[in-house]
Image: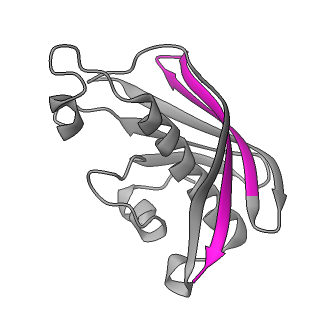
Amino acid sequence: MPMGIEQIKALLPHRYPFLLVDRVTAYEPGVSIRGFKNVSANEALFQGHFPDKAIFPGVLICEALAQLTAIYGFLTTGHRPADGYLYLFAGLDNVKFKRQVGPGDQLELVIEFVAERRGMYKVAGKAFVDGQLAASADILCAERQA
């Protein structure tokens, strides 16, 4: 069940330059979701991080994983932003960065469902580049209705 950028934008409130999921490649309810983020040399953040050695910030890898978690929540519940629902980053534990990510890399994002309780999702997130683990984190994401 691939999702393109327009379907993703229908679920997430983020827009350029902060929309960090380019495509969803697989979704299995109660199990996992997969997607990717293409890291481009044209991203404005590389002007300052770092001009002589472009490195995609680890916190943005974590944000990309959180955004994919929000998509997982919307697909799982069937709730939609148009109905006043939003997913918020609620926690981050056991974060590890294993390799640098830079222009030209494609971050493969993988979220594995751990638990859900009263609108709070706990997931295990991993980001890979060329099959190598780049980052991992346990993420809490909270569903809220306005």
- Residue drawn at x 38%, y 61% is 14
Q: Is residue 143 visible?
A: yes
Q: In the depicted view, which residue is nearer to us: 122 or 74? A: 122
- Residue 18, position as x, y percentages in the image: 33, 51
- Residue 120, position as x, y percentages in the image: 75, 60
Considering the image in quadrants, where does the N terminus appear?
A: bottom right
- Residue drawn at x 16%, y 14% is 52
Q: In the depicted view, which residue is nearer to us: 77 or 125? A: 125
Q: In the depicted view, which residue is nearer to us: 82 or 18? A: 18
- Residue drawn at x 41%, y 16% is 100
- Residue drawn at x 82%, y 57% is 116
Q: Main secondary structure of the magenta part?
A: strand
Say if the magenta span includes residue 132.
Answer: yes
Q: Is residue 35 visible?
A: no
Compared across the picture, whether 89 is left or right of 93 comes to left
Q: Quadrant of residue 46?
A: top left
Considering the image in quadrants, where does the C terminus appear?
A: bottom right
Say if the magenta span includes residue 123.
Answer: yes
Question: Please, is residue 34 above or below residue 96 in the view?
Answer: below
Total tally of numbered discs in the picture: 0
- Residue 23, position as x, y percentages in the image: 43, 47
- Report the magenta residues as a range: 121-146
